[in-house]
Image: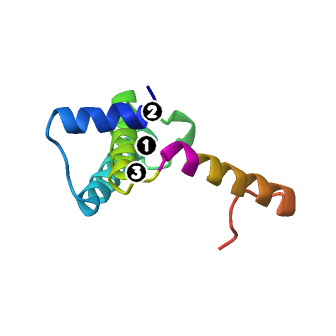
Amino acid sequence: MDEQSTVADFVRTNDLEAPAAYRLLDAVSELGEVAKEVCTSTGYGDDPGSVAVAEDELGDALFALLALCEELDVDAEAALLTSLAKYEDRLGETGQAGSGE
């Protein structure tokens, strides 16, 4: 079973359905918790080499993103593969992964 299906089954089994807008807010909130851990573990950037993030916080963010994908009827794996192809194209064209915007 893939991760998106696992999350979808968990949401259904535990009656945790929510509209996409709430799923998005949850994802942003969870990423904010990851950012907070990065900020505090690095002394707010004073020691960038000391990044520490708890595995469960990253797991919460992944859960929220996969639940959002499911709510929007987006195949998370297909979306990831599309994104990787986009970055690969950019690297080939400009030598940079970023869009430059």
The location of residue 20, given as percent across then percent down, is: 29, 60
Name the residue: 46% across, 41% down.
42
Is residue 60 toward the left or the right of residue 95 in the image?
A: left
**Whole-number angstrom distance, CA of label 2 to CA of label 3:** 27 Å
Magenta span: predominant SS is helix
Q: Which residue is mark 1?
A: 38
The location of residue 54, given as percent across then percent down, is: 38, 30
- In the image shown, does 24 or 46 lie closer to the viewer? 24
Disc 1 or disc 3, which is closer to the eye?
3
**Whole-number angstrom distance, CA of label 2 to CA of label 1:** 6 Å
Is residue 23 toward the left or the right of residue 17 in the image?
A: right
Type of amino acid at the residue the image marks with label 1? Val
The location of residue 79, given as percent across then percent down, is: 55, 51
Q: Could you classify mark 3 by the number of other residues whose Cα lies within 10 Å: few (under 14), some (14-19), or many (20 or more)?
A: many
Q: Could you classify mark 2 by the number of other residues whose Cα lies within 10 Å: few (under 14), some (14-19), or many (20 or more)?
A: some
Q: Secondary structure at mark 2?
A: loop
Answer with the quarter of the image where residue 101 lies: bottom right
Query: In the rendered structure, does residue 82 fall within the stretch colored magenta?
Result: no
Q: Which residue is mark 3?
A: 69
Name the residue: 32% across, 53% down.
71
Q: Which residue is mark 2?
A: 52
Type of amino acid at the residue the image marks with label 3? Cys
